[in-house]
């Protein structure tokens, strides 16, 4: 039989659990409602401004003639360079740290620094990109400088997520591969990577989602807010959608706020499309392995 003290302790724990459950549920609902209101406001303001002309026109001082063409193409250029760089470098680093590096002081220092870099403010990466890529390597204020800067920014995310994905692969799969005569590299390529690919794709989604919405590093390295031409090579000057949207939102004319809302919708559609494609690839390989 439970004593009175034990019953009081159990009731106290239940009340505390109910309180925190209600607190967390209310906080979640508040965040969801706030996000929904923001999305509704953006759609209402920008929906009527979306048109083919908006997608094919360059930015203009006249709100009705403004378009997002240069910023859209600049963002695509940036992602086309950033995505393969982050994937190749990030996954290669994770493979080395998990499959080859021994538990030494140096490897622990590297792991700690990678974890710390994930929390560094993005403006610091912008200053680093300005110093190294723009000035030291003389890449100027080009798409390549921006892509390399964004690669540095999101690399810690994909490295950490790829490491966690590789850790989830059972050691028994590796042992079975070794028993069949495969060496370490063949085991990594044919067993470990295919099994860890769903988690690696999730890290890629998160890293590119952050990269496509960043503004501060690109402003620091010199991405301009007005471009009246389409970039044709990685060495051309550029602008991206977040910078263009910020420029529109800072204009004194009230109509530019609606143009900015239309730009936000295009950015959201692009982001969700990228995520949907990555999730499709992740689920495909998850079913296969």
Image: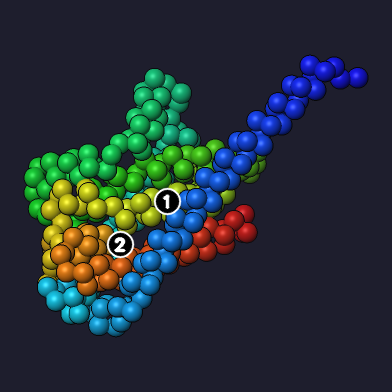
User: Closer to the camera, 196 or 180?
Assistant: 196
Asked if one can make out residue 40 in the rendered structure from this viewpoint, the answer is yes
Quarter of the figure with the C terminus? bottom right
Asked if one can make out residue 191 in the rendered structure from this viewpoint, the answer is no
The image shows residue 96, relative to residue 68, as above or below, that is: above
Q: Quadrant of residue 131?
A: top left
* Mark 1 burial class by Cα count in 10 Å: few <14, some 14-19, many 20+: some
Q: Residue 193: x and y, percent?
A: 51, 48
The image shows residue 3, relative to residue 160, as above or below, that is: above
User: Closer to the camera, 174 or 158?
Assistant: 158
Q: Residue 72: x and y, percent?
A: 26, 69
Return the residue at label 1: 206
Return the residue at label 2: 80
Q: Residue 59: x and y, percent?
A: 16, 72
Residue visible at 44% across and 57% down?
Answer: 35
Between the C-alphas of marks 1 and 2, the distance is 16 Å
């Amino acid at each position: 039989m439970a004593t009175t003290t034990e019953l009081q302790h159990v009731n106290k724990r239940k009340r505390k659990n109910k309180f925190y459950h209600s607190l967390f549920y209310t906080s979640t609902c508040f965040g969801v409602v706030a996000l929904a209101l923001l999305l509704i406001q953006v759609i209402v303001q920008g929906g009527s401004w979306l048109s083919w002309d908006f997608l094919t026109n360059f930015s203009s001082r006249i709100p009705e003639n403004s378009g997002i063409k240069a910023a859209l193409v600049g963002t695509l250029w940036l992602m086309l360079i950033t995505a393969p760089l982050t994937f190749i470098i990030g996954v290669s680093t994770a493979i080395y740290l998990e499959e080859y590096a021994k538990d030494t002081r140096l490897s622990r220092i590297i792991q700690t620094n990678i974890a710390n870099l994930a929390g560094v403010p993005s403006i610091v990466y912008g200053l680093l990109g300005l110093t190294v890529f723009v000035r030291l390597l003389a890449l100027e204020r080009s798409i390549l400088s921006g892509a390399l800067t964004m690669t540095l920014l999101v690399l810690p995310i994909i490295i950490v997520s790829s490491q966690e994905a590789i850790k989830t692969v059972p050691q028994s799969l590796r042992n079975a591969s070794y028993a069949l005569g495969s060496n370490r590299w063949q085991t990594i390529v044919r067993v470990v990577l295919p099994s860890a690919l769903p988690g690696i794709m999730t890290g890629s989604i998160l890293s590119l989602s952050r990269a496509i919405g960043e503004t501060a590093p690109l402003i620091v390295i010199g991405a301009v807010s007005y471009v009246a031409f389409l970039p044709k090579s990685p060495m051309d000057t550029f602008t991206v959608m977040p910078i263009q949207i910020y420029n529109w939102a800072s204009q004194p004319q009230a109509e530019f706020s609606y143009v900015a809302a239309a730009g936000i919708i295009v950015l959201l559609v692009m982001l969700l499309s990228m995520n949907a494609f990555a999730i499709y690839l992740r689920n495909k390989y998850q079913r296969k392995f």
